[in-house]
Amino acid sequence: MELMIEDILEQLVEMGGSDVHIQAGAPLYFRISGHLQPALSDEPLTAHESQKLIFSMLNNKQRKELEQNWELDSSYGVKGLARFRLNVYKERGCWAACMRALSSKIPNFDMLGLPDIVREMTERPRGMVLVTGQTGSGKTTTMAAMLDLINRTRSEHILTVEDPIEYVFPNVKSLFHQRQKGEDTKSFANALKGALRQDPDVILVGEMRDLDTIALAVSAAETGHLVFGTLHTNSAAGTIDRILDVFPPEQQGQIRAQMSQSLLAVFSQCLVPKANPKPGEYGRVMCQEIMVVTPAIANLIRDGKTAMMYSSIQTGMKMGMQTMEQALAEYVKKGIVNFEDAMGKCSKPDELQRLVGAKSLK
C-alpha cells in the first residue's frame, strides 16, 4: 500500500510523538517522549518513496528553492490534525526530512507550571527576556505561553518574527501581527527594522542568530519595547557570552553596556525524562535555570565578568533565581526525575551530587 504523508503524521500524533524522520534506505523514525524509535512499519524507504513523500508537501516555489539550495525550512499543515515544522535536506545524494509536530492548542501558562518570576517578566513594560536551550527543549512552548498570558491580560500590539510561525494567536485583548521569514519578510533583521515603525508594544524574535538581528533587538528593548528572543545556549552566562561573541571586539563594550541596561532575565531550559510517567502522560518535564538581572548582575555584564554569574544565581533565590543544578536537584528529591537523567542534563555534576546528597543516591 502506498504511503501517504497524512497517514504518517496522523500516526505520529496518535502516538504522542514530537518528530518524524524521513530517510532513503531506512524506515520512518518517530521521536516519542524524547526517545527515537522505528515507526510501526520497519520497511526501509526507497529513494523514490522518500522523495515522493517529501515533495508531496511542497509547492512549486518551494521545490524550486530546494533544488537550488538543497536545503529548505518550511511548515506543513494537515487540516483537523496539526501543523508541522519541516526541514528538508540532502543526505548521501537523496532527499531526507525532519518534521516536528506543532500543537494547534496554544499552551496555557498556568497548566505548564512555570515559575512566578516568568509571569512577572510578562508584566514588564519594556526590556529583553531571553529563553534559551537546545533544539527541542520547549523554548517555543514557553514563549507561546508567555505571549498568550499577555494576550489574555493586556491590550498590546504584539509583533512576532518567526521561522516558521508555529502557534497562530487569535486577537483576544491584544492585537497580533505574525510574520514568517521567507514568506512575509526576507530576514529577521529586515523585519525588525520595519517593526520599530509599526507601533509594537511587544516583539518576539524567533531566533537571534546574527549581529544585525541581535543589535536591533537590543535597541528595541532600549527604546521602550518588551522584547522576547531565543538562542541555542545552555546557561545564562553562556547566553551572554554568545551574544557578545557575535560582535567585533571594538563593539563589545557598547553591547555589554546596552545589555546591562535592557536585559531583564534569561531562562535556560531543558527537558528531562520523568521517572515514572503515567499512561498517556507526556514523558518529560521542563527544567529551567533562571537569571534575573539585578544591579549586581548588570554590573557583571557591563564588566565582562560572566564567570561570576553562576554564584550570583546560586544566592539569588529570593529574587526567583536558580541554577540548573538547583532545579534538577529539586526534581530528583521529589522523585520526579531519576538522578542519572538529571546528571545527563547538568554542566556541573559535582554540584548536583552535593545538592542531592549522598543518601538520595542509594
Image: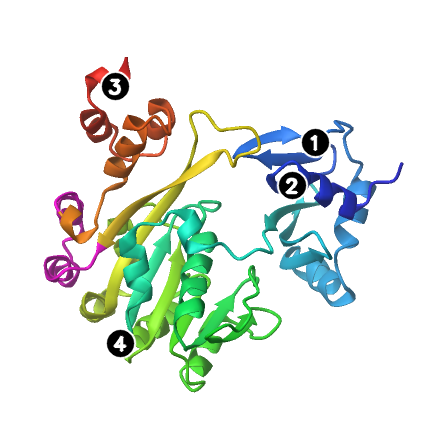
Q: Amino acid at mark 1?
A: Ala
Q: Which one is earlier in the sequence, the residue at label 4 or at label 1?
A: 1
Query: Is residue 115 located in the magenta-colored stretch of the structure?
Result: no
Q: Amino acid at mark 2?
A: Val
Name the residue at 71% across, 35% down: 28
Q: Which mark is residue 154?
A: none
Neighbour tally class for label 4: few under 14, some 14-19, many 20 plus, Cα within 10 Å: some
Residue to which mark 3 is pinned: 360
**Secondary structure category for the residue under label 3:** helix
Name the residue at 22% across, 44% down: 322
Spatial CA span between label 4 and label 1: 49 Å
> Is there CB contact under 8 Å for labels 2 and 1?
yes
Spatial CA span between label 4 and label 2: 41 Å
Q: State the predominant SS element of the stretch in magenta.
A: helix
Spatial CA span between label 4 and label 3: 46 Å
Q: Amino acid at mark 3?
A: Ser
Q: Where is residue 168, by image quadrant? A: bottom right
**Secondary structure category for the residue under label 1:** loop
The magenta region covers: 292-315
Spatial CA span between label 2 and label 3: 37 Å
Q: Which mark is residue 20?
A: 2
Query: Which x, y percent locates residue 163?
Result: 54, 62
> Is there CB contact under 8 Å for labels 2 and 3?
no
Residue to which mark 1 is pinned: 39
Residue to which mark 4 is pinned: 222
**Secondary structure category for the residue under label 4:** helix
Query: Which x, y percent locates residue 33?
Result: 53, 34
Left or right of residue 351, residue 225 in this image: right
